[in-house]
Image (cartoon, rainbow, N blue to C red):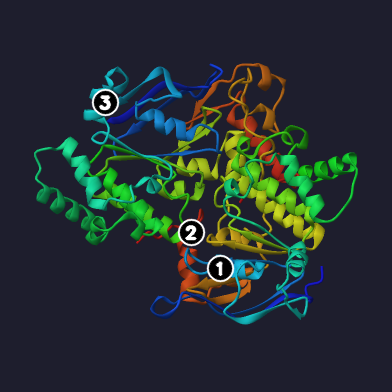
């Protein structure tokens, strides 16, 4: 039986600027994450994916503010809890969040073991120091990390090793959901693979039950996650299984995004990459119709003015006024006319 | 395109850092010939010496032994005048766009400096025209940008502005040191396409440094694989990527996720 581990309904969060303007970086996002599943969040920079990850923690500090919506983790609506309750019961235990470039935030004057001791002092004060050390060493060994790392300083570790250590530390309390925001973006391909292996390992050994993985590297998401959400201007543009999203995208934005994939495979050379013209809309003044209309090559007057609808077809969800048949017909025609040939 | 003209010729290039016990050989006995209008990729993991090699080609680091010939003559970098002359021909884009700008200068200052560097004397209108042309080459709107400070731009915009600079300077050689590692997948494809356009229109030699074999395969004619300071494999892109011979090349290729094949995570 599958249960919903994480349920997000109509989540709206905004940044307040100095001029008291409200910028909705997450504007009505709904999704459900089942127990044992992994979810990928993709999108350009500025599409709101990092803000969504931050908002999922339920912990807001200025300039980020909460407007409406609910986040239900394992049956509890965390938006109804006080800040203290949230900190002691939810963060770290139910949900763990690894921000972008977390590995650069390690205090250079402390050994790695001290970070773990700190966490344990707050969450499990009954454990003795020796117990914490044993537990940490055992955990690191199960994750194929050398226990020696525990007694080194952050500057003695390589970038990839630091990132893996950060992931191991943040999952030490066995959180149910791990939210990883671009954990691989500053690493080279070899360390990137090691990080992915570690996360798969955490899932297999049941240290974490679900994973929310945020990145712009689409081939990575295809191999790691079950479902992919594509964000655009604070909204979900399309959501479907990884296979559907990579090989058969429906929303014009997803289609373009998939056109920018570069992999070392035969046929990649000479293959024309698709670039999306323009920039995402300024979220201070959101266009009334479809937010992608200005950059979409199929946009019509209806797109710009009419209200966009969310369509649900074939187990996927997308935000466009056209149905799948029309869109697919356009893509086929474009391919025939010598346009971009997607493999 | 004339691919027979050898532009940069390096023989037994070696760079050693430190002395005695702390000696580290970053680049060891590297030989190559870069031709005019060629796009060359140097691929390797972090710490393999690719950036050191790039800095040596740029003349920012001296070589411990070996020599570099530029346009068939040994390269001279002794005096300030020589160096200025050399850097008119050779330019670079670096990894981190956020730190390649002077934060106190607005965008138009950055671009007018390029005009000054070339020693041109132009009227305000002509300068404006030139800057506008450079910005439109990289799909940026100069009218919106010129009065902005670098921190007001996004990473992708900054990196494209660096390319606009290159477009104005028309160097013979461009060294791109991981220009796409800090921008998202969308801007990445735009930047790669611009590099290709620069080569096609200006017959520029581009040295592209990356850790991602996928990108290297997409842009380059020739790929060199670098491991621990040495070139372990080199040749036409098709050969190196589709028929890799060296163990390290195979490993690099298997580390990159692909979409039509299973990714072996074991």
Q: Nearer the viewer, mark 3 or mark 2?
A: 3
Whether callout 1 and callout 3 share a subunit is answered no
Using a 10 Å C-alpha cutoff, classify the residue at mark 1 as few (fewer than 14 neighbours), some (14 to 19) or many (20 or more). some
Quarter assignment of residue B87:
bottom right
Whether callout 3 and callout 2 share a subunit is answered no
Q: Is residue A281 above or below residue B263?
A: above
Using a 10 Å C-alpha cutoff, classify the residue at mark 2 as few (fewer than 14 neighbours), some (14 to 19) or many (20 or more). many
Q: Which residue is mark 3?
A: A86
What is the CA distance from the residue labelled 1 to the residue labelled 3?
48 Å
**Is any part of residue B172 visible from this angle?**
no
A179 displayed left or right of B122: left
Q: Which mark is residue B90?
A: none
Q: Nearer the viewer, residue B70 or B191?
A: B70
Point 61% across, 66% down: residue: B55
What is the CA distance from the residue labelled 2 to the residue labelled 1?
24 Å
Query: The residue tagged with tag 2: helix, strand or loop?
Result: loop
């Amino acid at each position: 039986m599958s249960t919903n581990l994480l349920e997000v309904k109509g989540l709206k969060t905004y940044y307040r600027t100095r001029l008291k303007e409200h910028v909705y970086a997450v504007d009505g996002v709904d999704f459900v994450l089942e127990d044992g599943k992994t979810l990928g969040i993709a999108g350009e920079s500025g599409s709101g994916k990092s803000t969504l990850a931050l908002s999922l923690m339920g912990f807001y500090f200025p300039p980020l503010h909460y407007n409406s919506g609910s986040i239900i983790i394992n049956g509890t609506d965390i938006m109804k809890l006080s800040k203290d309750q949230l900190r002691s019961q939810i963060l770290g235990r139910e949900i763990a969040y690894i921000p972008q470039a977390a590995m650069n935030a390690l205090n250079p004057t402390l050994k790695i073991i001290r970070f773990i001791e700190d966490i344990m002092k707050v969450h499990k004060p009954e454990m003795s120091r020796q117990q914490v050390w044993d537990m940490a060493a055992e955990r690191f060994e199960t994750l194929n990390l050398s226990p020696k790392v525990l007694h080194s300083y952050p500057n003695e570790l390589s970038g990839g090793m630091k990132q893996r250590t950060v992931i191991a530390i943040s999952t030490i309390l066995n959180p149910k959901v791990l939210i990883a925001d671009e954990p691989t973006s500053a690493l080279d391909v070899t360390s990137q693979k090691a990080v992915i292996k570690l996360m798969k390992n955490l899932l297999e050994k049941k240290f974490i039950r679900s994973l929310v993985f945020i990145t712009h590297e689409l081939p990575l998401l295809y191999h790691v996650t079950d479902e992919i959400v594509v964000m655009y201007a604070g909204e979900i543009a399309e959501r479907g299984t990884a296979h559907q999203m990579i090989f058969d995208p429906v929303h014009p934005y997803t289609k373009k995004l998939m056109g920018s994939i570069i992999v070392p495979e035969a046929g990649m050379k000479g293959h024309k990459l698709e670039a999306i013209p323009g920039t995402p809309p300024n979220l201070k003044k959101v266009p009334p119709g479809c937010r992608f209309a200005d950059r979409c090559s199929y946009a019509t007057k209806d797109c710009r003015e009419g209200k966009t609808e969310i369509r649900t077809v074939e187990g996927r969800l997308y935000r466009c006024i056209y149905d799948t048949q029309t869109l697919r017909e356009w893509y086929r025609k474009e391919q025939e006319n010598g346009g971009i040939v997607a493999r | 395109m004339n691919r027979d003209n050898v532009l940069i010729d390096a023989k037994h290039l070696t760079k050693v850092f430190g002395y005695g016990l702390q000696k580290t050989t970053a680049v060891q006995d590297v030989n190559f010939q870069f031709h005019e209008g060629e796009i060359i990729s140097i691929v390797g993991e972090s710490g393999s010496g690719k950036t050191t090699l790039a800095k040596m080609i740029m003349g920012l680091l001296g070589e411990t032994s070996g020599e570099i010939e530029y346009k068939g003559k040994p390269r001279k970098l002794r005096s300030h005048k020589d160096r200025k002359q050399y850097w008119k021909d050779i330019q670079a884009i670096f990894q981190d766009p956020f730190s390649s700008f002077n934060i106190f200068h607005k965008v138009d200052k950055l671009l007018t400096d390029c005009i000054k560097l070339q020693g041109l004397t132009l009227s305000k209108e002509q300068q404006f025209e030139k800057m506008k042309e450079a910005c439109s080459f990289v799909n940026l709107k100069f009218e919106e940008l010129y009065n902005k400070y670098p921190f007001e731009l996004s990473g992708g915009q900054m990196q494209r502005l660096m390319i606009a600079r290159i477009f104005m300077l028309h160097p013979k050689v461009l060294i791109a040191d991981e220009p796409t590692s800090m921008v998202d997948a969308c801007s990445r494809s735009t930047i790669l396409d611009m590099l290709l356009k620069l080569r096609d229109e200006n017959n520029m030699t581009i040295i592209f440094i990356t850790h991602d074999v996928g990108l290297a395969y997409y842009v380059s004619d020739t790929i060199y694989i670098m491991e621990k300071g040495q070139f372990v494999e080199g040749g036409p892109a098709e050969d190196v990527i589709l028929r890799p011979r060296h163990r390290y090349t195979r490993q690099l290729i298997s580390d990159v996720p692909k979409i039509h094949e299973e990714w072996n995570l074991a």
